[in-house]
Image: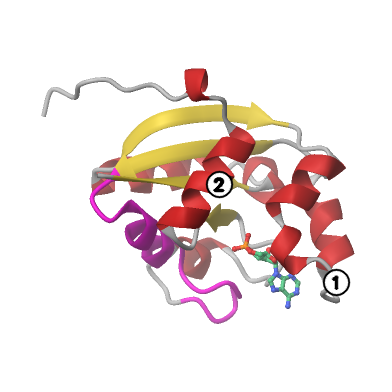
Amino acid sequence: MQRTLVLLKPDAVQRRLAGAILSRFEAKGLRLVGLKLVQADRALAEKHYAVHAGKPFYESLLSFLTSGPTIALVLEGREAVTVVRSMMGATDGAKSAPGTIRGDYALSVQNNLIHGSDSPENAATEIALWFTQAELLGYALCD
Ligand code: CMP
């Protein structure tokens, strides 16, 4: 069983798409083990996007992530990292395939609604950045 970090970025909250996006993951069969509304500050945004430091879009990306509340999720399931990323679609909303989250709801490359960890190793790092251990709940499902 794998865990992954998902962020419903400020544009998803602003556009009231959080429920629609979360529904897709639940319907797929992923288990919700962490969920919270977070106003990210610059320090958190810098840590989350450290790999992009120095890129031309970095400052704008930090402003975007700190512009309003983000919904942070931890989802668990078989191959959760890959499953979430394929459901998200390509980074650029204009190029993401219809049927994916970005393909259906996003047109921008920066304001692309959602972030998902790109490897199990990065998922572990990102989960620890956004959640304490006590905020992750293990529980049985009745299915
Ligand atoms: P995400 O999957 O969270 O990973 C890095 C983020 O940087 C990406 O989603 C976009 O929000 C943003 N991003 C990536 N490439 C660009 C770009 N060329 N211009 C602006 N923003 C970008």
Q: Provide the residue designation for mark 2.
A: 125
Outermost left residue: 143
Q: Is residue 65 magenta?
A: no
Read off the magenta span.
Answer: 77-96
Amino acid type, residue under disc 2 in the picture = Thr
For residue 119, what is the image quadrant?
bottom left
Type of amino acid at the residue the image marks with label 1: Gly
| Whether residue 12 is situated above or below residue 143 in the rendered picture | below
Using a 10 Å C-alpha cutoff, classify the residue at mark 1 as few (fewer than 14 neighbours), some (14 to 19) or many (20 or more). few
Residue 60, how many percent across, how many down? 86, 62
- In depth, the one of 49 and 11 nearer the eye is 49
Where residue 143 sits in the image (x, y, percent)? 11, 29
Residue 29, image quadrant: top left
Q: Residue at x 45, y 44 (%)?
A: 20
Ligand 1 neighbours mark 2 (CB distance < 8 Å): no
State the image coordinates of residue 4 (x, y, percent, origin top left): 43, 47
Q: Which residue is mark 1?
A: 54
In percent of the image, x 32 and y 59: which residue is there?
83
Disc 2 and disc 1 in contact, CB within 8 angstroms: no
Asked whether residue 71 appears in the rendered view, the answer is: no
How far apart in space, not on screen, are marks 2 and 1 (Cα)? 21 Å
Element at label 1: loop
Sequence-wise, the earlier of marks 2 and 1 is 1
Which of the two discs, 2 and 1, sits closer to the camera? 2
